Image (tube, grey):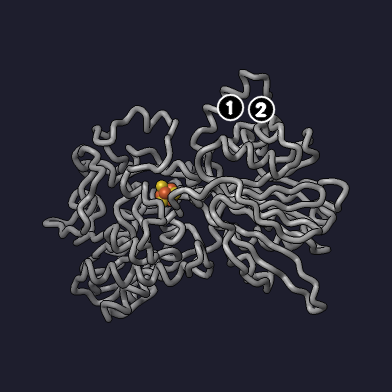
């Protein structure tokens, strides 16, 4: 009997993308296009709030940007100011109730908020606020900020926002819209990106834009101006742009994974080209983990720039030996007759003519649970590869993220409890090499320790309130990694090692090629 199958992508997922417009007659249309360019940052729900100077207008729905914002919907969002949000939930469930921007009518007037990031003390604040009589409409951590704004004694919104944000911990790149102002705010550690842009019409009229990534500006022919600084609140109004420092900047913790995987390679993130970082990662990977082989094959799409870098450095030919289906939906009818690797084949298919008889270097950006990587290795072998050498353009991912990224639990992360040798064996690869943490820092030009690397080290820069972290001692024993429905023996349980050796490469003595 056929059944519906949900296709799970074995990657970390960024939580959200935000986009703001000030001073354009088609603000909602621009917000729609901006969100369209940021769709990779969240596909579960999207929303736009616009203002015509008197009223705020909102539309939020489940689904992707293109399907939600039909012309008839955009026509109901008038005005020259707008903020948009696209969401892949981390805190709070996936219901429409939690879709953003959130809108409130409080003692500071009508306000809409769109948030990228995750607050690490939200649960604690929620308990306190509920105790004091606040009634929450959603279970998203962003609503904590809303209640703290409403409770602030400050006379104006910028003061109330500063009050609220100085009481929360964690990651926030935030857009706030009132009837006649747009605020763009970044937390003092600068976890998530937020960029300021400018759109100049042929008549010389200037509109201001704010986006999670600069690829959204490119679509609109807008100009990237600068980053919103960590600890900075930019207020855009008819009087112009005002920069307010609402909190002292702390030790920077820019998410390094934005450069490894989340952001689009055509974006500038934290003032640096993402594509440049990824190609450099591939080059450094080739230097740290060389291997005799015939072709370099990326796991598309996100593994492509690193594979280009690996091929350029190693002088081994780059081949698109795996083709990605870009039109994949969310659920599928699985045939009643079992098809090997069915789930992964929906997304990727090998080009047998390129792979057959070849020693293949397979380059991917990360390994999370390992289950998808294992299927890809098997698929490449079935297409006739003589050898499969897996190269990963980030260090082993051993710890979850609490700063706005959807990650599996520590126990589900294969590298949290398995050595590279065990992972290599589980994947069925001939060898496995991870780029080292120093190389990753070098690839993003991080000479001053400005990047967060917690998912590779297990060391977090903020006080966390999550139960999982409280309950697991830094060097305590973690559960076994989850390896799907394998009939092969599971790798042995290993203790979590917080401090990892610099180089991660292993050669398997025996490869597993069938199950
Ligand atoms: Fe980024 Fe990892 Fe830090 Fe999360 S823990 S902010 S994914 S580097």
Label whose residue precedes the other's in the sequence (1 or 2): 1
Residue 348 placed where, x, y %? 42, 62
Side of 27 where 101 appears, left or right: left
Residue at image location 60% in from the left, 31% down from the top: 139
Residue at image location 83% in from the left, 63% down from the top: 25
Residue at image location 31% in from the left, 80% down from the top: 317
Residue 212 placed where, x, y %? 58, 57
The total of numbered circles placed on residues is 2
Residue at image location 76% in from the left, 61% down from the top: 240
Residue 55 placed where, x, y %? 86, 46
Picture quadrant where residue 373 is located? bottom left
Residue in front for this viewpoint, 226 or 322: 226
Residue at mark 1 to residue at mark 2: CA–CA distance: 8 Å
Which residue carries the number 1 mark?
126
Picture quadrant where residue 512 is located? bottom left
> Does any portion of residue 31 appear in the rendered image?
no
The relative height of residue 195 versus residue 12 in the rendered view (above or below) is below
Query: SS at mark 2?
Result: loop
The relative height of residue 113 versus residue 24 in the rendered view (above or below) is above
Side of 445 where 118 appears, left or right: right
> What numbered label is drawn on residue 136?
2
> What numbered label is drawn on residue 429?
none
Query: SS at mark 1?
Result: helix
Q: Is mark 1 within 8 Å of ligand 1?
A: no
Q: Residues within 10 Å of mark 2 (few under 14, many from 20)?
A: some
Callout 1 touching callout 2 (CB < 8 Å): yes
Q: Nearer the viewer, mark 1 or mark 2?
A: 1
Q: Residue furthest left?
A: 509
The relative height of residue 291 versus residue 28 in the rendered view (above or below) is below
Residue in front for this viewpoint, 112 or 291: 112
Residue 265 placed where, x, y %? 49, 68
């Amino acid at each position: 009997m056929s059944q519906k199958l949900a296709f799970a992508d074995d990657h970390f997922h960024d939580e959200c993308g935000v986009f703001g417009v000030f001073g354009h007659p088609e603000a909602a249309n621009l917000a729609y296009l901006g969100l369209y360019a940021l769709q990779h940052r969240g596909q579960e729900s999207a929303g736009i709030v616009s203002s015509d100077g008197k009223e705020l207008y909102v539309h939020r729905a489940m689904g992707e940007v293109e399907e939600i914002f039909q012309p008839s919907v955009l026509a109901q969002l008038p005005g020259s100011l707008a903020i948009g949000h696209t969401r892949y939930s981390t805190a709070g469930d996936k219901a429409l109730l939690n879709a953003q921007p959130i809108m409130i009518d409080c003692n500071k007037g009508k306000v809409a908020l769109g948030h990228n990031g995750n607050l690490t003390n939200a649960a604690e604040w929620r308990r306190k606020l509920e105790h004091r009589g606040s009634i929450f409409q959603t279970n998203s951590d962003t609503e904590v900020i809303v209640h703290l704004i409403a409770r602030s004694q400050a006379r104006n919104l910028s003061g109330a926002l500063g009050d609220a944000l100085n009481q929360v911990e964690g990651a926030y790149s935030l857009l706030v819209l009132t009837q006649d102002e747009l605020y763009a705010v970044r937390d003092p550690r600068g976890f998530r990106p937020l960029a300021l842009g400018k759109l100049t019409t042929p008549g010389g009229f200037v509109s201001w834009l704010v986006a999670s990534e600069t690829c959204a500006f490119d679509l609109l022919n807008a100009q990237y101006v600068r980053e919103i600084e960590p600890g900075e609140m930019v207020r855009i109004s008819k009087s112009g742009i005002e920069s307010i420092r609402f909190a002292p900047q702390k030790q920077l913790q820019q998410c390094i994974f934005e450069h490894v995987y989340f952001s689009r390679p055509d974006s500038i993130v934290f003032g640096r080209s993402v594509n440049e970082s990824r190609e450099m990662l591939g080059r450094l990977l080739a230097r740290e983990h060389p291997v005799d082989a015939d072709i370099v094959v990326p796991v598309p799409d996100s593994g492509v720039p690193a594979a280009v870098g690996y091929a350029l450095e190693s002088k081994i030919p780059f081949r698109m030996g795996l083709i990605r289906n870009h039109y994949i939906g969310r659920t599928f009818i699985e045939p009643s007759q079992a098809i090997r690797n069915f789930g992964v084949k929906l997304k990727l298919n090998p080009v047998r003519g390129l792979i057959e008889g070849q020693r293949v270097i397979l380059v991917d950006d990360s390994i999370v649970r390992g289950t998808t990587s294992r299927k890809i290795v098997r698929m490449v072998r079935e297409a006739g590869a003589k050898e499969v050498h897996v190269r990963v353009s980030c260090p082993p991912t051993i710890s979850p993220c609490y700063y706005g990224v959807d990650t599996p639990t520590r126990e589900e992360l294969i590298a949290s409890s398995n050595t590279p040798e065990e992972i290599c064996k589980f994947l069925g690869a001939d060898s496995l090499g991870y780029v080292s943490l120093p190389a990753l820092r070098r690839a993003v030009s991080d000479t001053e320790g400005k990047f967060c690397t917690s998912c590779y080290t297990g060391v977090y820069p903020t006080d966390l309130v999550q139960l999982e972290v409280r309950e697991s001692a830094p060097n305590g024993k973690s559960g076994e990694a989850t390896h799907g429905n394998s009939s092969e023996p599971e790798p042995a349980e290993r203790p979590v090692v917080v401090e990892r050796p610099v180089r991660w490469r292993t050669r398997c003595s025996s490869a597993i090629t069938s199950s």
